[in-house]
Image (cartoon, grey):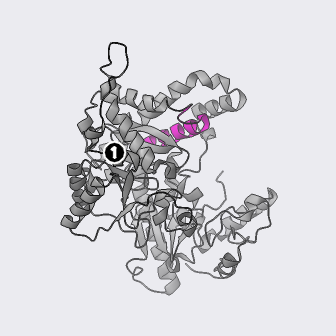
Amino acid sequence: MENPVIYHNMHNRYGESLTWRSLSTSSRYSELWEKYMTSQRSLDHLYHKLFVEYMRKFKLNPPRWESRSLTNPHRRDFFGAYYPVAFHGHASDAMVPTTIASLLLHIAAYPSSLFPDSDGSAPPVDILPLLDWNSSHRQSPRLAILSRSFGAGYGPLASICPFEESKSVACGSPPLVIDLQQTAEDLDSTLTRFKNDGGIALIVQIIESQWPWTVIESKTLQTLSNICSRLKLPVVVDETLTALRCGAPFAHQRPEYLEVINPDFVIFGKGLKANGIGVNFDGETLRALSIYQEGDRYRCAFRWHDKHTRAISVPTLIEALFTLDMARDEDWPLRSIEIGRQIRSAICAQERGERGITQNPEPGSIAGLDALLYVRKNSIKGAIVQGIPEGDYIRLLPVLEDAMKCPAFISNCVMGRKSLARRRVTSKMLKRMHRKPLWCYVCGDATEEVLGDDVAWCEDCCIATCGYPECEKGFTDHQCLAIIGYL
């Protein structure tokens, strides 16, 4: 029997949830989880095997999306050539200059360890010249980042974060912010000075995280790639939000970018469950370090992992494997294209109905790429969906479930007047469980329900407010579906 609840949540824990389904839907992963919950020791001997399986699946499993000519048909891997090497609690932890510098030094030093001295130790090698570094790169490493990027939640890159609460805790040397309006010659001069002054890498986002959320042009990306290649400046692509959502496993693997950029690192996290850094040993800069053999690449990765007790916790590892299996088997990258198209179509239809017009909304009302959307608030206020407010826009991060491709499902179960009955059923279910919605409809933060406090909510629309005064008015003024009819 169909579950008669509402699926209006496109907040999904800031994009962490890519599916409604849990581990219980898989016999293999539910069994692993049961073992973990009842006898953690029974999984200890399996940990290394599971971790190796994760690394291989991250890189080597051939996905169906490649056979559909969305990318190079000769490539037989999932996330390109990336080996997941460095794992962190949060993607912001991975975007720290000293962390990336240490990883670069580790990779550069690895080839010398293949030819040990007679006593078995690695011979001393001056690795700074291999990276075209001097002492300033090691002692005071800096990162460059494109303008209108997210940056990070804390640390040096938080200085450019669009959220004041993150910007206020920024510390360390701020990144060099690259303005893409510069000419190619000016970009070259800017990055050359940066490299000479201790710059170690350039961080790139395929979609801007600040208004107007522009998708980077392939020509611009190629210009940056060519400059960084000449300077031996590694390119790091931040795919924290875009992985699996934008028509390819990583957004920079879309057809328009495949021939113009060959990054050295990728930052991943959120929906992939594990957060960290993927290394491309064939990247434009790293390939000069000559780590060619697959066995050597895995050994280089594991030697980095050996610096930690465990690179990744068992629960996270199980969830990450579950996610990779579903993403590959159900072709989430390809599915994200159709989901994005159908949600855009539904938003346009809803706005036409509200305004009584026949043409589509004005340009700029919807930005983003595929299943990562930024929608002007005025264009979606009548839909009553839970997203993440970004100024005058709302960021929508839908799950990559097959049902989200269906216009009827979106109309009846996700947004608009036709979903009213399901919202009321869901509210009744929450009340029986003594629960309320977890996310503030106005600001997107967690509601005070998390702290056990009373939360104001609309049981007709199944939305709540966090309780802060500045959100109360916006919540009170929402267009309740029980009163305002459209479509």
In the rendered view, would you say 412 is above or below 101? below
Q: Position of residue 269 (x, y in %)?
A: 49, 48
Q: Which residue is mark 1?
A: 135
Q: Is residue 107 magenta?
A: no
Task: Name the image quarter holding residue 57.
Answer: top left
Q: Is residue 134 left or right of residue 160?
A: left
Q: Residues within 10 Å of mark 1 (few under 14, many from 20)?
A: few
Is 49 placed above or below 27 here? Answer: above
Q: Is residue 433 visible?
A: yes
In the image, 282 versus 255, the foreground residue is: 282
The residue at the point 47 percent across, 81 percent down is 352
Q: Outermost residue toward the bottom? A: 356
| Stretch of the chain drawn in magenta | 310-330
Residue sitting at x 24%, y 57%: 192
Q: Is residue 406 visible?
A: no
Residue 431 relative to residue 382: left or right: right
